[in-house]
Image (cartoon, helix red, strand yellow):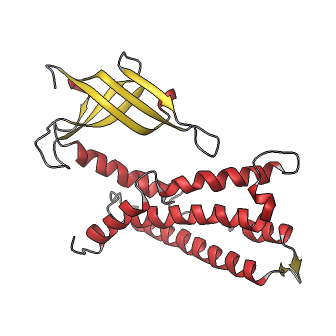
Amino acid sequence: MDGDHFVINGQKVWTSGAQHADWMFALVRTDFKASKHDGISFVLLDMHQPGVTIKPIQLISGSSPFCETFFDDAIAKREDLVGELNKGWTVGKRLLQYERSGIGGMSGGGGKKKKVKRNEFVEIAKEYIGESSGKISNGGAREKVLNHSMLERSFQLTAQRVMEENRSGKTPGATTSIFKLVGANLARDGSELKSELMGTQGAGWTGENFSENELETTKNWLSNRAVTIYGGTNEVQMNIIAKRVLGLPE
């Protein structure tokens, strides 16, 4: 900190929407002698200032929702400190719990009953593999669709139950890591299953031989693998569950 402002130097990778942002929040180290979770402050800073460089990251799926952000003597005003000095991780941790609950499927329509949608995995399998007497003709594919659909439905019902229990306004806690972990794996595995059911048509990137839906399936298969990384990797979530939920020794 220099007088009434912070001078920021460093790099932030995977900055969502940085190329479109006017402001950014950042967790910056303000006490280099403190332990790793202390000595961090939560600040807001103007993205349209000298010393801020933004470089979009081209993902394998073809999109660029994330960026690298470089800071060279960038400035954050003292008045734009959120919370207490050196206590920013407390704020950041709480925000991450909200983010993970959203990624894990716990945001949105709070306990309202929704109509059960037609099973898209069944429809894809019947279209690309075939059907016999109204069933997916291949037994192995039928089992994979059944197992995934049961897990997905069980997850939705569990999330709905937890949302109803938390309608009192209780803030999310470490258990959100369970929903982030399971929800991320479901998204990844669901995209992979769709591509698998389509066979070679589910592996196209461009060309007249692929429909728009088939090309979109390939991109979703690639992009949904990132769900197990952003918001905290699967490994991070398992560590949190082990320590904060199950109380296992480190």
**Observer-nearest residue: 61 or 30?**
61
* The furthest residue to the left: 33
Q: Quadrant of residue 233?
A: bottom left
Does residue 82 appear in this view?
yes
- Nearest the eye: 116 or 54: 54
- Which one is in front, 24 or 250? 250
Quadrant where the image shows the N terminus = top left
At x 72% / y 55%, what residue is drawn? 217
Q: Quadrant of the C terminus?
A: bottom left
Q: Is residue 214 above or below residue 5?
A: below
Expressed as whole percent of the image width and height from the top left, the position of residue 48 reads 41, 18
In the displayed structure image, the side of residue 212 where residue 99 appears, left or right = left
Query: Left or right: 191 with respect to 104?
Result: right
Q: Is residue 95 above or below residue 23?
A: below
Question: Where is residue 106 drawn, in percent x and y?
Answer: 48, 60
In the rendered image, residue 221, in percent from the top left (x then y), is placed at 65, 56
**Residue at image point 16% right, 40% down:** 86
* Left or right: residue 16 compared with residue 34: right
Q: Position of residue 97 (x, y in %)?
A: 36, 55
Residue occupying image coordinates x 49% and y 67%: 182
Q: Nearer the viewer, residue 240 or 120?
A: 240
Whether residue 117 is visible here, answered yes or no, is no
| Residue at figure coordinates x 33%, y 57% from the top left | 171
**Location of residue 67 with respect to 117 vertically, above or below:** above
